[in-house]
Image (cartoon, rainbow, N blue to C red):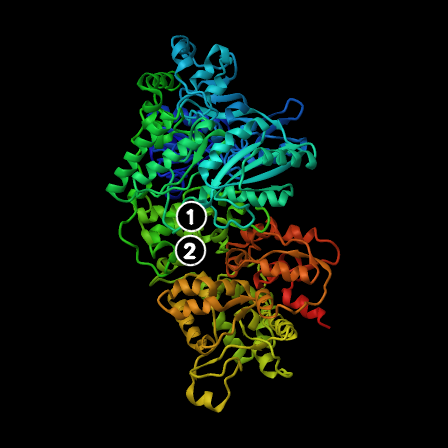
Amino acid sequence: MTDLEAALRRDVRGEVGFDTTSRALTTMDASNYRRVPLGVVAPRDADDVAAVLEVCRERGVPVVARGGGTSIAGQATGTGVVLDFTRHMNRLVGIDPEARTAVVQPGLVLDRLQDAAAPHGLRFGPDPSTHGRCTLGGMIGNNSCGSHSVAWGTTADSVRELSVLTARGRRLRLGREWSGAPEGLRELVDGELARLRTGFPDLPRRISGYALDALLPEKGADVARSFCGSEGTLGVLTEAVVRLVESPRARALAVLGYTDEAGAAEAAAGLLPLGPLTVEGMAVDLVPSTEGLPRGGAWLFVETGGDTEAEARARAEAVVRAADVVDALVVTDPGGQRTLWRIREDASGTATRMPDGSEAWPGWEDCAVPPARLGGYLRDFRRLLTAHELRGTPYGHFGDGCIHVRIDFDLLSEAGVARFRRFSEELADVVVAHGGSLSGEHGDGQARAELLPRMYGPETVALFERAKAVWDPDDLLNPGMLVRPAPLDANLRFSVLPREPVDVEFGYPSDGGDFSAAVRRCVGVAKCRTTSVSGAGVMCPSFRATGDEAHSTRGRARLLHEMLAGELVTDGWRSTEVRDALDLCLSCKGCRSDCPVEVDMATYKAEFLHHHYEGRRRPAAHYAMGWLPVWLRWAARARVAPVVNALASVRPLAAVAKRLGGIAGEREVPRLAGETFSRWWRGRRRGPAGAGDLVVLWPDTFTEHLSPSVGRAAVRVLEAAGLRVALPPTLRGRAVVGDGTSRSALALLTARRGGRVCCGLTYVSTGQLDRARAVMRRTLDLMAPVLETSAPVVVLEPSCAAALRTDLPELLHDDPRAARLAARVLTFAEALERHAPDWTPPEVNLPAVGQTHCHQHAVLGDAADRRLRESAGLTGELSGGCCGLAGNFGFEDGHYEVSAACAEDQLLPAVREAPDGAVVLADGFSCRTQLEQLAGVRGRHLAEVLAERLE
């Protein structure tokens, strides 16, 4: 243990982490930069912060304050000690509705403040798109803004008082009229009044540099306001008194369509006199689909408020009349507004990929110019991009003249980095020529601080250095930011990654087969760190259960990045740090859809486990549950299901079996079906064949051996809809499609023993990819006759359907049959909708509760299911999240508590609050098992509910 670590552990009550994992999780924020800290401290209170500062000051170790880690300019990274305020100093201390103020700690997430203020009709004005995970301390440090800044200004406009610790341990209470000013600050200002009155651009989004002009006497000598935007370089915030504003009782959203972004930009300033709450802009090259948007090549999102919906709508319609638009849309429905706003909020992630899938990066994320000059600036910006042969997709706060953009810089080669520097220098000159600020929201950090002399001139920058020296004479706090900055092309996080592709098993088709590129997808937007999900969202259940960064999608991606870098995590695929972080990943695939850049941690986990255990003994659970299809087939062939069930009911025997199999002792072993689905299929009486389309019903492991009632119900419904149902062949060769046994003489003469089809899911989820590949190839051999037909493959278990849609073609990327089979896969509802469009389901007419299966949400989509439920009279919305059992995850020893916590996040509360007589829907076997074991509730597949009503 180092002297620094020992001293911190002695003097600090909060957690002190100098281990590899703690450091790896904080090497990066959401910027292009990377620094490896010495350690991380999660202080419990201001006394802890003071102790950290004293220990570090005595040893000359830098200190960096960190909130949600969503900074885009690099200011939340450092080489010394990182203060993580999100673990303990994250409380809402109090709220005063009469005074319209709140007292907050720096680690409080913005949405938690909004939730507390909402019942009083109040809100915090600024609202960055990262509102679900950014912290108030980070917002104050960066002087964050958000989409409502045209109405309520920046964070600095919402700050009343700040409690701050200086690097030398002084506790200050900052406010107006020089309240809390450190010694020497007033004298500095008094000697530079002329410069402060003339040297700062007058525009709503000037975030660059220090806000020393807020200390002018005519501006109230507001020390708290001047501290905002100082990026942790002047002092460490421990508490803040912030101002709240009245939230409109009703809102309307006018979406205005324009021919192009320049037209939208030029129109934005003209709408400001109408008093909108927002004027946001984006162009078509950032929108995955224009469905739901009015005609045009660019749009303004203009929000209006009022005491009533009619008043808000009237103001929105007035905006439409005042705007010269191609087309327009006014939305007052809150759900419709949320859907449209989600397009805009996800732009910070979706912009990291160009339309052709190539990478784009921050660095020039938020320049701002006077709103009236925005159209001209955008045209100059586009010309500069073209001159440097670069591409970007601008969007942002058009009403404030602030533009966000990700650009396809090549930050991997020397030539590309050199171009990045040249472009940055030239763009800085363009911004200044338009009277703008290099930063209009996210701060300067390392990305732009080097260029501040181009904006302010050397004399004003020298004044910034003198101000820094007044507050922090030892240059202890976040050195290299704002003053005496590190070069903008140093410390790039990509420089440590391998230049040659890593040898991997999956194909990573969206990343050119490059695992490093797949890991680079995570840019730190941190949507995975939200503490609640809305609608059907899933990501990231393990983070919501533990609150630990290591168990977020971003945290795991950071550890994989460091594994590839090899500097901090040195054991490569054998890394125990990466293994432990991935251990609580449920492989729910939620990040594949909910992450704005589609990080696929389930696939990365399977890849890692494959390499980590290659040639080594695996955990017992990998054999017990990874090979589940084999054990269940053996039990079925030997017809020992009754014996197994009887033995499993004897607690001492079950306890021994669970311990040997690596299964959590709290779990009950599911009962095996007395008759498998295929055996029922072979023995059932068949009626006359229908005249409808042929569909091949997939006998997945769970339906076959554990829930055959689902398969029987699906057959009844599909046949009632007029479809001809068949099962896949079980023999290789020219087997008859769908007879389930291939007993014809010709088939028997020409066929070879093949076994049964399997998607390979259990092998993939446990990282046994060699075995998964062998199982999948055998399946493709068996399915050859099916692939010669046009029949769809109907899969009842969502996790198996998702495995066939994604894991199969990505793991067998060298076998064209894999993609062909994946394209045939349909869910139960999709099969009915596409192949029996005129069929009317039986009327159920009951409320429905439950949870959309996480794999269905992430990979398959549930639009057809929603329409089928609606047609059957099943009302109500299913919850989001993940059930927490997640196949083998919730059964594995050591996972029970997290598994149960995930169920309590969404699923179990929804079932408890269900109205009387509600149908509990759960299409996945894991979901049904979790409901039964944790709540004593029987969930049913939609096919079972419909089959019951066919009578």
User: Dot 1, crowdedness within 10 Å: few (<14), some or many (≥20)?
Assistant: many
Depth check: give the residue in front, 134 or 319: 319
Residue 552 in the image, given as x and y percentages of width and height = 47, 46
- Element under disc 1: helix
Numbered circle sitting on residue 656: none
Q: At x 47% / y 31%, what residue is drawn? A: 138
Residue 875 in the image, given as x and y percentages of width and height = 69, 56
Is 535 placed above or below 481 here? below
CA separation in Å, label 2 and label 1: 9 Å
Depth check: give the residue in front, 579 or 845: 845
Q: At x 63% / y 54%, what residue is drawn? A: 878
Question: Which of the marked residues, 2 or 1, is nearer the chain's N terminus?
Answer: 1
Snapshot quadrant of residue 945:
bottom right
Amino acid type shown at disc 1:
Arg
User: Dot 2, crowdedness within 10 Å: few (<14), some or many (≥20)?
Assistant: many
Residue 363 in the image, given as x and y percentages of width and height = 37, 36
Q: At x 73% / y 53%, what residue is drawn? A: 915
Snapshot quadrant of residue 388:
top left
Q: Is residue 101 visible?
A: yes
Q: At x 43% / y 39%, what residue is drawn? A: 394
Quadrant that contains the C terminus: bottom right
Residue 876 in the image, given as x and y percentages of width and height = 68, 54
- Element under disc 2: helix
Residue picked out by circle 1: 556
Depth check: give the residue in front, 348 or 49: 348
Quadrant that contains the N terminus: top left
Verify CB contact (< 8 Å) between mark 2 and mark 1: yes
Residue picked out by circle 2: 605
